Amino acid sequence: MRNIKNVTCKVLQQKYLYQPRLSILYYSTAKNADTKVHLAAGYQPKDVEKAYWERYKEEANLPQAGNSCNRGPYRMLLPPPNVTGNLHLGHALMATVQDVIARQQRQLGYEVDWVPGTDHAGIATQVVVERTLTTAQGKTRHDIGREAFLEEVWRWKAAKGAGIVQDLRLLGCNLNWSREYFTMDEQQAHAVNVAFERLFDEGLIKRRNSLVNWSTTLQSAISDIEVELMDIKEPTDIRVPGYKHSIAFGRIFDFAYTVVDGETQPDGSAEEIVVATTRPETILGDVAVAVHPLDPRYSKYRNKDMVQLKHPFRNDTIPLVFDLAVNRDFGTGAVKITPAHDKFDFELAARHKLEPRQVFSQDGLILDTFKDFEGMLRFEARDQIVHLLESMGLLRQVRPHPIQLPICSRSKDVIEYMIWPQWFLNCKEMAQDALSELNSGRLQIVPSNFEVEWDRWLQDGRDWCISRQLWWGHQVPAYQFSDAQGNTHWVAAPSEQEASKKAIALLGGSEEELTLVRDPDVLDTWFSSALLPFSAAGWPNASYKEKYPLDIMQTGHDILFFWVARMMMMGLKLTGEAPFNKVLLNGIVCDAHGRKMSKSLGNIVAPQQVVRGASLDSIMDGLEQSLQAGVINEAEMDVSYKCMSKMFPKGIQECGTDALRFTLLSHNIKNHFINFDVTTCHTNKLFINKIWQAMRFTMGAAERLSISLHQYETLDGVNLGTWDRWIIGRLGETLAICSDSYKNYNFHMATAALKHFFYQNLCDTYLETTKTEINHRTPNGYIHVGTLTACLSWGLQAMAPFTPFVASELLQHVPLNIEVKLSEYADRKLDAEINDIVGICQSIRQLKSKNKVSKRHEPNLTLFASSSESEEILGRHLQQIQLLARCESVDLDMLDENSKHSRKMNLFSTAGPLCSFGITMSDDFGMTVKQREEMIRVNIKRLKRLMTELQKYRMRLDNEAFQQMADKETREHFKNRVKELEAEIETIMQESA
């Protein structure tokens, strides 16, 4: 027992903590050393997570930092998931990234304030509740009225909204739930009203008619992020809401405008200008035809005072105008101008002072100003207009044409560009201020390539349309008042009483003389979201400064402008201080095939399906529930059914939360897209089980040696063996990689390093080499157990941010602060030597596996060293080689002209530059001629590969430019590699002789 006392009885001294310092620790409820804790035979995620929550039932009992150092607050805000459904994998990625950051910052001594919340998601929620209302009651929101509909939404939110919060908790996120918010709670509503009022009073918010993205199904303007562009390469039939039949898109129509008082053509026809359009239904709203002023085809019209064209469906004419923005290479170079329904046309018409003519109503019907088409659906009117153009002799050609069709992501309707009275926020100066934050270096965006996107979005500084024609959301706090003389004005105020006071102050008179009407529209969801860094902290109450600004904003790169840039603009404007100084952006989570997860593709996988597993039947039941809840429609249900049946014919295997978290962060989160594969996730569950089994082995070894793992307090001063020193060195390098990875947000490098350490280094290699000494209860066996304990303790603490549940479970069984000076075990020469030995053992195992050699064949291994130096190296590791190669015995011999043993061997091969090897088996192993020929063929193939590689290295060394440009270390590497290749080639040649 003296040996073990040497190992265990030193008291931990703080000054001996290893270097480099570990960035993350996990604070487990470690048991008393005398308490025996059972560890199940295998890793079962459900049981482990259940035990975790039983240990920490109350939030106050969740693992907290054991570091007494208080370096101040570290503030984060979780991007609020929409209240419309459960957590999806994109949310899970962001939440996991931030949870890892939070755990790291707590270990560094910061008091982390990580704020959760959910978004009211105006359009998305209204669409879902409307579907539910239609399914359950057969009614629309208009049937029951605004007030009753809003009551339905609040009931739906109360019933369904808790699901996403529960999903976040189950993911292990250690959020500050005491500060949880909802973007339409009382505090947020107050902040929204105050922000609108201040910006309005400053003259930055104004109401005007302007062109917006319009959904005729929702009867509302929508933001650019809610518009999906569908690429159509050829004529294609598309299902459009509100139509009984599919609508054809992907065609272009050439038709003629007749020139008024034009010259008669030689064939007797009238002079005409042919234009091309993909939207014949908008001809009704044409106000001009435009051509490029330098287009020679139309130069004859340049000197005329006014060229008029006869409109085919209106009893009037439209002018021919010249504009530099016209693309003269497109079609005939002449384009029709419909400013009421096209962005390009709207801007061109404004330059030429042309009045727009509205064609469609807000629900997509032709207006009553066009009597022949009044009340027709826009795409039905298209067919009628084309037919009439043909009968009038004006249709020239219909041909295929690729287009990008704008689709509403919520209703799947085709977007119509409409002029509608809206509220706009002037962002020009705010955008410049946000740009200055980046250009001055005060703001850092990671990855830095998105700085270009920041600049691109903000340089333009366009006005922001902040109103929506919905019922669910923050109603615009603006009132239109009229006096007795008919004068009207708008005022912004949080209530009707405040609005009346402002109105009286502006116009005078009494309250009785004024009529006030509140705008029925609601604000864009992004408006309230843009306030969150300070509104969630209590703004406009001055106490918000205690919790503002944030230290980092982490979210998806796809909302860099729509949310992140707007938070910066609003924060600077309304508080005078940037809401954060660092932005970390992650990529979009896609399926295993690289397709973005969406309802239209039917490939959405929920995190809890991965965590708990799901049979195909349960997946289908979940889709049916989503259909009933209005989250998906019938078409999306059909697509999802087919996709899920193809992707998961046997269902989804249970992976557990830890494997999900580990898999998500095994990808480079800074990549543009992140392909999530459930199969990889299940592989990581098996990896976690590998660590579990290593802990079981270590606990069993301690029990065999009649000691407790908690007796191990230090490895300082202990005479560690070669392989002990090697694995501690690998531990040190792994922890150093983790530390650097956390700083640079390269979490994939940390997970890769941890996986390599636990899987290849610890479990598959070092642990196997300890079995003989432990079984024989030698002094070295005690040291091996101490080394295993240190590796598991420090390694699991590094794993804990990624896999908190299993780390918490396993860290109960080991001491948390085993003293070990990691910097003393960094040894490149030893690493290279052990790597060579491990490589030799892998070659031996591969040859055995290929020839189906098992333990019953009693394989005996002979190593043939290529040199005396190789013989010395191999001699130091014969015991470990025997264990790792799984052979009955190991002999070592020199490879020379006298060693023709390979001919007596059942199997023989090379294993790198150090040696070749042969294996003899018992008599019951019969090697066929075919097997021997295959073995010779493999060796010849290896010889050719080595010869080719040797030639390449020699050519580089003989190159004069290489000798001049390469540094000394590189030249030495090449020389050593040449020697290694020559030695291995010589070995194969001798064996084949």
Image (cartoon, rainbow, N blue to C red):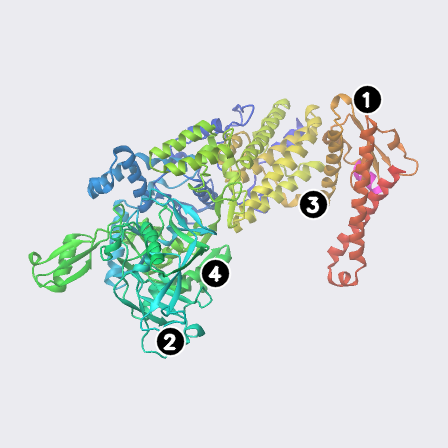
Image coordinates for residue 324, horizontal then vertical, percent: 41, 71
In whole angstroms, how far apart are the C-alphas of marks 1 and 2?
102 Å
Marks 3/4 in contact by CB < 8 Å: the verdict is no
Q: Disc 2 marks which amino acid? A: Tyr
For discs 3 and 1, the disc positioned in front in the rendered view = 1
Q: Which label's residue is closer to the chain start, 2 or 4?
A: 2
Q: Nearer the viewer, residue 801 or 299?
A: 299
Circle 3 is placed at which residue position?
827
Which residues fall within the magenta stretch? Answer: 868-874
Residue depicted at x 31% and y 75% = 306
From mark 2 to mark 4, how far is it between C-alphas?
Answer: 43 Å
Q: CA distance from mark 3 to mark 4?
A: 43 Å
Q: Could you say where residue 601 lies in the image, as x and y percent from the top left? A: 45, 41
Query: Which kind of residue does numbered mark 4 sit on?
Result: Val
Closer to viewer: mark 3 or mark 4 = 4
Q: Earlier in the sequence, mark 4 or mark 1?
A: 4
Look at the picture and state if 232 lies above or below 677.
Answer: below
Tag 1: residue type?
Ser
